[in-house]
Structures are given as C-alpha cells and as structure tokens.
C-alpha cells in the first residue's frame, strides 16, 4: 500500500456546523466533539508513522468545510494538482494548501472550466481512478491526467457526491465498495469486498502500509476487512458523517 510520510490536516473551525450537507442529522453537529474526533484522527495518523502538518486555522473560520482538505489537491509522485472546487462557497480553501505543498512538490492549479476534487480520486500503484460526479467533470479529469502524467480510469455517475464515498482501495489488489459500484468494469481484476447496504459509510477507508482506518459502528465491514488480512483501527466519525465527510476527507497524504 501507499507509503506516505506526511499528512496535511486542518482542524474544524467555529463555523463547521454550517457545513454543506444534506444529512438528516446535520442540525445536530457538535463542533467541540468534531474537534475531539479530529485530534484522535491525527493521533491515529501519527501512530501510523506520519508527520502531521497543520494548516492555519484562519481559513477554517471563513470556510465551514475547510477541514476536508483532501478535496483541495490531488498528489501523485512529486506533483500536486491544486483543485478547482465545484462549490463556489468552498473556492479559496485551496490557497494555503498550495503554499504548503509547493515547499515539497511541483504544483499547478486546475483551470476553468475544470472542476476536480480529491474526494473523487483513488490512488493505485500504477494509475488513478477518478469519478466524474457532482464535484469533478471531464475537463478536471483531463487536466489531472495531463499534469500528473499518469493513466486515469473514470467512473461516471452524476448521482455521486464523491467517488470515495462508495469505493476505496485497501492495498494488495483489494477494494472495498458499496453494492452500487461493486461490479463496475473499472474494478475488474480486483478483489472487491462489498459492504452491507446498512454499513455503506464503511466503504470510505484510509489505508496506510496495510493498516486500515475505518469508521466505528460497522462491525460486519470491519470483520470483512480483517478477514482479508488487514489490521483495522476504528475511529468515531459521527460529526464528520453528519457533514457528509469521512476518513479520507480529513487529510492529504504524501
């Protein structure tokens, strides 16, 4: 599995409860609990051997969704494409991310009419899989492919918010997916672990060095991943689920 050394993160800001979300429990978002859960997430990343780079909190105050830093860039090798976020209310979150990543990587901004977000991009050893969704369009995929110089397969489904809400890569040629995408042709050749429909949120996992972070409260999915040979570590993600965010959303790994 991927061998990143650094994780870029940003703590949920004061206005986090104003996040973009259609989740039925969005009105119950507890920012203090979200901060606690975010700190536990960062500890878990450090336990996996990653150095944590904290982004300035100022942007988190201006942008409720700014803790979901994964969306702001797509990193491959020594390059990072800085995203053009689909929702105008989020455009601007990427500014400090670009500054931080440019210290270590060659960066370039995606340009209009492209929209492209990291939550739509699955990183594989030899290529990327990118969703064409509500947040990423074909122009975004084209700029991603051209700048990063890597093959990009696509899964097209405009009903999806982000691809990685439905499928993520565990390593060892193994995917975990919801029934919606389990038999998609792009996943042919992989072992696909299909989560029960009632545990669909568990399809978003964060795998580092054959260790897998998963959201608490999904015992069938967790048992499935352990049975496939992975070490599983569970985190409470309740306040991020309410904002339609998940494990991968909260960091940029490189």
Image (cartoon, rainbow, N blue to C red):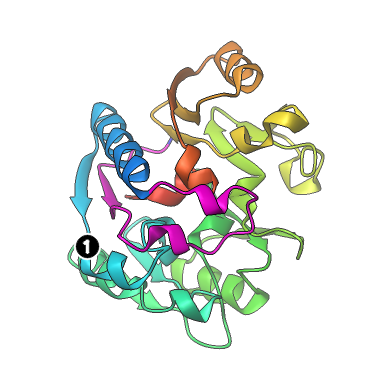
Does residue 62 belong to the magenta stretch? no
Count of numbered tags: 1
Residue lying at 68% horizontally and 30% vertically, measured from the top left: 199
Q: Nearer the viewer, residue 104 or 164?
A: 164
Q: Nearer the viewer, residue 23 or 101?
A: 23
Secondary structure mostly seen in magenta is loop
Say what secondary structure mark 1 lies in: loop
Residue 86 x/y as whole percent: 55, 75
Does residue 21 belong to the magenta stretch? yes
Residue lying at 58% horizontally and 59% vertically, measured from the top left: 21
Question: In the figure, 94 relative to 42: above or below?
Answer: below
Residue at the disc numbered 1: 57
Q: Which residues are magenta?
A: 2-30
Tell me which corner region of the image, top left, top right, bottom left or bottom right, holds residue 68: bottom left
> Seen in the image, is 111 located left or right of residue 102?
right
Residue lying at 59% horizontally and 75% vertically, measured from the top left: 142
Question: In the figure, 208 relative to 79: above or below?
Answer: above
Residue 26 x/y as whole percent: 55, 52
**Which class describes the residues within 10 Å of circle 1: few (<14), some (14-19), or many (20+)?**
some
> Seen in the image, is 50 located left or right of residue 91?
left
Q: Is residue 223 visible?
A: yes
């Amino acid at each position: 599995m991927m061998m990143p050394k650094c994780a870029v993160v940003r703590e949920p800001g004061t206005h986090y409860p104003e996040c973009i979300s259609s989740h039925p429990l969005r009105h119950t978002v507890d920012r203090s609990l979200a901060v606690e859960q975010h700190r536990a997430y960062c500890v878990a990343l450090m336990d996996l051997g990653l150095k944590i780079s904290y982004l300035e909190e100022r942007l988190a105050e201006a942008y409720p969704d700014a803790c979901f830093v994964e969306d702001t860039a797509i990193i491959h090798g020594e390059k990072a494409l800085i995203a053009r976020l689909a929702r105008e209310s989020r455009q601007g979150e990427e500014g400090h991310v670009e500054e931080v990543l440019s210290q270590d990587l060659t960066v370039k901004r995606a340009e209009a009419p492209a929209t492209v977000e990291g939550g739509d991009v699955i990183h594989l050893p030899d290529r990327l899989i990118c969703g064409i969704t509500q947040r990423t369009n074909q122009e975004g995929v084209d700029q991603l492919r051209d700048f990063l110089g890597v093959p990009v397969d696509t899964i097209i489904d405009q009903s999806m918010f982000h691809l990685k809400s439905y499928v993520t890569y565990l390593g060892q040629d193994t995917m975990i997916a919801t029934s919606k995408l389990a038999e998609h042709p792009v996943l042919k050749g992989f072992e696909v672990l299909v989560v029960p429909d009632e545990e669909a949120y568990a399809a978003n996992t964060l795998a580092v060095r054959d260790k897998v972070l998963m959201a608490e409260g999904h015992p069938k999915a967790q048992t499935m991943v352990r049975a496939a040979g992975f070490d599983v570590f569970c985190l409470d993600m309740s306040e991020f689920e309410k904002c339609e965010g998940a494990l991968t959303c909260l960091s940029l790994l490189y």
